[in-house]
Amino acid sequence: MADRQEEKLEYLPEEAVFRRNAFILITTMVDLSNQTPQDTSMLVEEVLHTLFFLGVINCPPFSPQSLLDDDDEILDYLKKEYPLPFQLYLTQLPRMSPFSCLLDMVVSLYGQENEDQIKDKLKKIVDKMKKDPTSNKKEESSKKKKERKPKIFFSSTICISRINISSSCIYYGVSMSTKGRPAGEILVASSCFSFWHRLVSDAVMTYYPDKQKKSYFSRNIKIPTDIKCEAFNISEGRPMDPCTSCSDLFGLDTNECRRWAHGSCAEVESLSNLFKGEQHVMEGLGPDENEQEGRLRAEKRVLKHLKKQLKIFKDFNWDGRFYPNLNPNTN
């Protein structure tokens, strides 16, 4: 009995981890925003909106107040400073995962060229989110115990892309970080429509959501040889091979046999940011206007799957827009 009681103390229930990690992200984003020389309030708004949305589709659902540790003072402050997320989280879809918002904030703080500082800051935040505050600090004795800790809202992988190894223009991306399959699938679809570069969204929609290449739409690409795309484990810093899905999407060489869901890897976001920042890379990669009919068909397939996922959640009534309301209605 003593061992079982100790085990209950050592591991937080997923619901508590959900709330705790959401609170860490929110307070961290506000603190970092106050340190950045430029206006990064939009990133704070995006992380609030994304977390509030993920709270309402969670089972059990969480209100914004519960994600803010039921602290009325913090709630009132955020409502005053960032009112839109509170108004729109029940009707508009987020464009990216919470940890992607954090990544953009950290890059804004340290500067795009300061790779080591960015990786070190993310590691510290991930380590904080992984830590169990109810633990008695006893060393874990087995791999099984480690695997039982829920991983919610923090990414395990960062990807760094650049045109060549000596380039100071570095583009970052992190793996998709949500909780549960529906949330991850919703954010992949949302990112395809509203956040990722078209080259990347086309590559993902070539396979998503059916996990196999579409017969009528083929926009997976082979990135140029002068692009360096490297992934690392955030906590351990070790290099990681691309998974076979990244090989499908971008022609990346790999010895990795595992396959993650198309669109969930850090390489997707990193290469999307590179394509946005280096327009000349698009030459020879597309888009192919001859495939416009196939693309529209692929978009309809992704949209149909997205709407099917959203129907599960009765408290969310999508108006067809993506926060911060920059995109046309997709209905």
Image (cartoon, grey):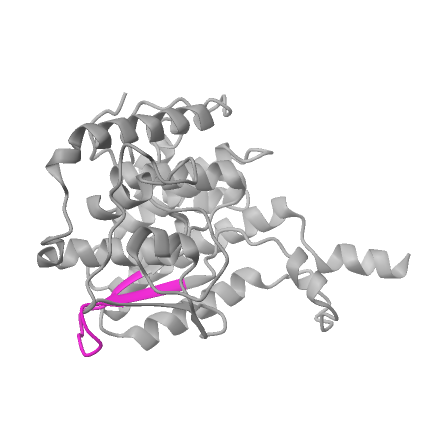
Position of 170 with respect to 286 (left or right) is: right
- Residue 157 position, x and y percent, is 43, 62
Position of 284 with respect to 251 (left or right) is: left
In the image, farthest residue toward the front: 215
Q: Is residue 278 above or below residue 94?
A: below
Q: Is residue 313 magenta?
A: no
Please tell me which residue is depicted at 35% across the width and 52% down the height of the picture.
Answer: 248
Asked whether 321 or 284 is in front, the reply is 284
In the image, farthest residue toward the bottom: 166
- Residue 315 position, x and y percent, is 48, 23
- Residue 70 position, x and y percent, is 54, 42
Taking the image as drawn, is residue 49 in sight?
Answer: no
Asked whether 302 or 316 is in front, the reply is 302
Query: Could you tell me which quadrant the C terminus lies in?
Result: top left
Taking the image as drawn, is residue 275 in sight?
Answer: yes
Please tell me which residue is depicted at 29% across the width and 33% down the height of the picture.
Answer: 322
Asked whether 255 or 85 is in front, the reply is 255
Query: Could you tell me which quadrant the N terminus lies in?
Result: bottom right
Position of 69 with respect to 165 (left or right) is: right
Q: Is residue 160 magenta?
A: yes
Q: Is residue 250 above or below residue 183?
A: below
Residue numbers of the magenta segment = 158-172
Say which quarter of the image contains residue 250.
bottom left
Say which quarter of the image contains residue 93.
top left
Position of 14 with respect to 111 (left or right) is: right
Please tell me which residue is depicted at 24% across the width and 51% down the height of the picture.
Answer: 221
Asked whether 77 or 236 is in front, the reply is 236
- Residue 314 position, x and y percent, is 50, 21
Tally the marks: 0
Q: Is residue 166 above or below residue 304?
A: below
